[in-house]
Amino acid sequence: MPTRERIGVAVAAVLLAVVLPLLNLLPAGSPLAVSNFTLNLFGKFLAYAILALGLDLLWGYAGVLSLGHGVFFGLGAYAMGMHLMLEIGAKGVYQSALPDFMVWNRVTELPLFWRPFHSGAFTLLAIVLVPALFGLAFGHLAFRSRIRGVYFAIITQALALSAWLVFNRNEMNLGGTNGLADFKTIFGFPLHQASTQRGLYVATALALVAAYLLCRWITLTRAGKVLVAIRDSETRVLFSGYSPAAYKLFVFVVSAALAGVAGALYAPQVGIVTPAKIGVLPSIEMVVWVAAGGRGTLYGAVLGAVGVNWIQSWLTTSYPDLWLLFLGALFMGAVLFFPDGVLSALGRLGARLLRLVPGQKRARLDAPLRSRAEPHGVASLPGHPRPDPSSRLR
Amino acid sequence: MTTATSIIYLEDVTVNYDGFKALHHLNFFMDRRELRVVIGPNGAGKTTLLDVVSGRVKPESGRVIFGHHTDLLHLRENEIAQLGIGRKFQTPSVFVNLTVWDNVELSLRRASKGVLAALRQRGLADERARIAETLEAVALADKAGAPAGALSHGEKQWLEIGMVIAQDPELLLVDEPVAGMTDEETARTGALLERIAADRSVLVIEHDMEFVRQIARKVTVLHQGAVLCEGPVEQVQRDPRVLEVYLGRRREAADAVH
């Protein structure tokens, strides 16, 4: 990793994992104090950023657009949610050992697949392994059949839709439309206490740093170069002796696992898990975070996830009607005007302005991976497979 | 039957694209260390021949044997590449977002090109020497750090040839290497291919008869998915069947043959 990036990561890690929680400890009146509400909000954003990192690795590097990552996020969130439901024990409304919604649905016995979630250790494993294994099975079928580009995006969208339908069903014993909620404790710590929430926030920040380092490490190895190569010319990769399917499967599984971790950190901080987090729309929103932040850079994914959600929470409280319009505009803007992300577009604008000032040296641009060889416009639609001149239809 | 010295051997190979027989009971073989040029009118099955050998297209019937007894029919493209068959595409196919150096590094022959091997490391001294040597051979040493997307068309063609050489293949399949090149680039490419053919087998598909005359020792003419005739370039050019095939199809091609 270049020194500049090392310093950047270290500074960001200290700011997010140490300084922000310390500011939260300040008395409420002091000017620098960070409220519990704000810290909790940030915890949610950082959880999203973990997912965005995986999505960027998949889409920004390997060029595989997934419109179904809400599913993997949901699997992690539900795994954690199930454990939290069981931790409630008999303290629920119906004083039963079963989760309230089961009593309400006249379920008399805890379903078999719920039982292992009594164990905290099993839950922690499941958070990573359930989405990873599901991603492995799904990705194996898709990549082996050489489904790529737009077609892959479409079947992942179908996955998001079907998963949403399944999780909505009461017969699944996952709480149906209402999902899982009213959590009381996590590993024995009461969730309503500020100290527990602060701990969860710190855990999320550390997980984000670890996820960043993992993704960066992958991109710096030869495997990372193969991922970029796959985006450039999958055929050439294949004829150079690599199996693109194996590499895509690998990165798909990594991103699914990261999405699961993100979901698991999201659940206790937000306090509710519903199918609304799984479907088509949330999955597209996740892609917008990465597109807005600038794909193929990793830090862009983090900034995009935090930035877009920050704006969302501000807009939805101040101007609730504007949010969807803004989201749509952002997506169109990302496609038409700033395929490298908002930051890079601002950087270009800044450079252009600097050039207008006489005597100023030209600003150096941190040109991200993509733009160089590609014309703007429709051809650079995110996820639109780059025309591979050597490929012809079989 | 494979001959003791053949590098690639196709027997009775038929490729059927929804009723169109791109290859029709084709028999074809090449000796080791041979530089062979395959010509033929459009639709004769030249590129399909490369597709079959490199595993991209699976024939409906026939046998494809690499070396002494390696059956290629059940292998995937990347497995065939790992066996030692390299392919250079007609339009340059390089990794535009990677540096010239990285393009060659990814192509280097290695025991394993799996994910786990690629996550463990990189950058060994002898690897670096091989990359530098390859870049030297294709005259791109001074552009090693540049993104491949910034190269000119001719340089990209050369880079791709370099990438295929880096795979250290026993057999190189080269599809119209000089399409779109200047005369000077064409001449240099011809010399490069002849150097490569000194210790490898090279199968070239070409339209440019000037270039064919420059490099070819033995020429195979394909027509309607089968071999029409085979022999030294002068003999093939005078063959009345060849003239007829070209005359019947394309005036300018016929002129090119004359």
Image (cartoon, rainbow, N blue to C red):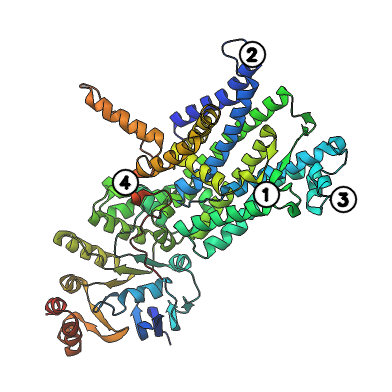
Marks 4 & 1 on one chain: yes
Question: Which residue corresponds to mark 3?
Answer: A108
Question: Which residue corresponds to mark 1?
Answer: A129
Circle number at residue A24: none
> Label 2 neighbourhood size at 10 Å, few (<14), some (14-19), many (20+)?
some
Q: Amino acid at mark 3?
A: Thr
Q: Please say if B253 is above or below A338.
A: below
Q: What is the CA distance from the residue labelled 4 to the residue labelled 2? A: 48 Å
Q: Amino acid at mark 1?
A: Leu
Residue drawn at the location 72% of the way across and 26% of the way down: A196
Circle number at residue A376: 4
* Sequence-first disc among 3 and 2: 2
Q: Nearer the viewer, residue A45 or A228?
A: A45
Q: Amino acid at mark 4?
A: His
Question: Which residue corresponds to mark 2?
Answer: A26
Q: What is the CA distance from the residue labelled 4 to the residue labelled 1? A: 39 Å
